[in-house]
Image: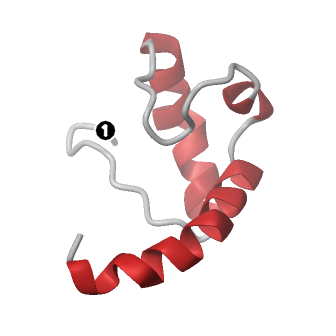
């Protein structure tokens, strides 16, 4: 991230995380994991690719998925 963006990102990041948490399924949030940084196991990855990514897209988030995922 460019240094010039640091303050803008820092001032907005709490609201971004709040919006993201509102879009994710409750079971993803109750495990105590780092929502943004924790790796997904196979089942959680499938859930994200199959359903959660669509939910985030519908909520206005940009989601980048692997090229092989259709």
Residue 44 in the image: x percent, y percent?
A: 53, 21
Residue 40 picture quarter? top left
Depth order, front residue of 57/12:
12
Left or right: 16 with respect to 63? Answer: right
Q: In this view, does 10 lie above or below 18?
A: below
Depth order, front residue of 3/46:
3
- Residue at image point 62% right, 57% down: 17
Label 1: element kind: loop
Depth order, front residue of 12/43:
12
Q: How many marks?
A: 1
Left or right: 31 with respect to 65? Answer: right
Q: Is residue 14 above or below residue 52?
A: below
Residue 22 in the image: x percent, y percent?
A: 76, 53
Quadrant location of the N terminus in the rendered image: bottom left
Depth order, front residue of 65/19:
19
Colour scheme in the image?
Answer: secondary structure
Residue named by callout 1: 69
Residue 59 picture quarter? bottom right
Residue 34 in the image: x percent, y percent?
A: 55, 33
Q: Determine the residue located farthest toward the top in the rendered image.
A: 42
Quadrant location of the C terminus in the rendered image: top left
Q: Is residue 48 above or below residue 63?
A: above
Estimate how packed mark 1 is, as few (under 14), some (14 to 19) or many (20 or more) residues with alpha carbons within 10 Å: few
Residue 50 in the image: x percent, y percent?
A: 52, 34
- Residue at image point 33% right, 54% down: 64
- Residue at image point 32% right, 82% down: 5
Q: Is residue 56 above or below residue 67?
A: below
Left or right: 42 with respect to 56? Answer: left
């Amino acid at each position: 991230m460019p240094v010039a963006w640091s303050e803008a990102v820092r001032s907005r990041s709490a609201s971004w995380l709040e919006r993201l948490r509102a879009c994710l399924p409750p079971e993803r949030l109750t495990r105590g994991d780092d929502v943004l940084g924790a790796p997904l196991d196979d089942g959680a990855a499938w859930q994200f690719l199959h359903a959660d990514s669509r939910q985030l897209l519908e909520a206005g988030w940009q989601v980048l998925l692997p090229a092989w995922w259709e």
